[in-house]
Image (spheres, grey):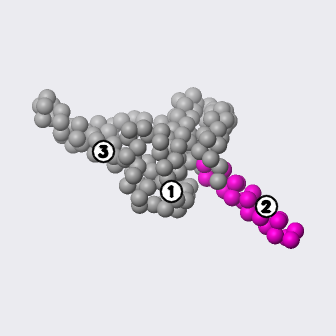
Amino acid sequence: MPSGRTHDRITLWTLPVVAGVTLAITRNGQATLMICAGYFFGGLMLGPDLDLHSIHYKRWGWLRWIWLPYQGSLRHRSPYSHAPIIGTTLRVIYLLAWLGLFSYLVMALMNEVWQTGWTWGQIGRLLATFLNRYKAEAIALCIGLELGAFSHYTADWLSSETKRKKKSKRKSED
């Protein structure tokens, strides 16, 4: 398999290609920016190798502990971590669950200390309004996240396939 640094190089070197192709297809700078942001974040921070103590995991710094339950529940390269769409969706849902828990704690603290009086209904309506208003941007971000992970899957597959062919060739020569 390619190393974490190789995956990083792939992400960084293909980002201009993703930007160019996206801009050519969409003719929309905002959509291009969101896809590129998702691609960059998906490739460097939310990659499939979060199921290991990888470079992706280490980049989370003092927050890396949030990925320990994820690592403990998945074996490396399982369909739940390394399958297109499923793996990215699971990582995004997992991260959103942590963000939701953190938000709940912050809201409870703010309601207790500053007596803000916020309710989950208000927060839900605000979030729904935001997502409805920025639906296209949210979809573009999700596409970018998946493309970032897809570059990882593709590099892993190409590396495995190359090794398999070399091994097969050596066996046929013997």
Question: Relative to the observer, which residue lies in front, 133 or 80?
Answer: 80
Identified by mark 3, the residue type is Gly
**Given contact means CB atoms under 8 Å apart, are the residues at marks 3 and 2 in contact?**
no
- Frontmost of labels 3 and 1 is 1
Q: Residue at x 21, y 37 (%)?
A: 107
**Of helix, strand and loop, which one carries label 2?**
helix
Percent across and percent down for residue 70 are 41, 55
**Of helix, strand and loop, which one carries label 3?**
helix
- Frontmost of labels 2 and 1 is 2
Q: Residue at x 23, y 37 (%)?
A: 106
- Frontmost of labels 3 and 2 is 2
**Given contact means CB atoms under 8 Å apart, are the residues at marks 3 and 1 in contact?**
no
Going from N to C along the chain, the mark reached first, 3 or 2, is 3
Question: Relative to the observer, which residue lies in front, 16 or 109?
Answer: 109
Residue 166, which numbered label? Answer: 2
Q: Which residues are magenta?
A: 152-174
Residue 148 within the segment the image draws in magenta: no
Can you see residue 117? no
Q: Residues within 10 Å of mark 2 (few under 14, many from 20)?
A: few
**Of helix, strand and loop, which one carries label 1?**
helix
Going from N to C along the chain, the mark reached first, 2 or 1, is 1
Q: Residues within 10 Å of mark 3 (few under 14, many from 20)?
A: few
Labels in figure, total: 3
Q: Which residue is mark 1?
A: 81
Going from N to C along the chain, the mark reached first, 3 or 1, is 1
Residue 148 quadrant: top right
Q: Residue at x 56, y 48 (%)?
A: 149
Seen in the picture, residue 105 relative to 2 is either above or below; the reply is above
Identified by mark 1, the residue type is Ser
Identified by mark 2, the residue type is Lys
Q: Residue at x 33, y 46 (%)?
A: 98
Cα gap from disc 3 to disc 2, whole angstroms: 47 Å
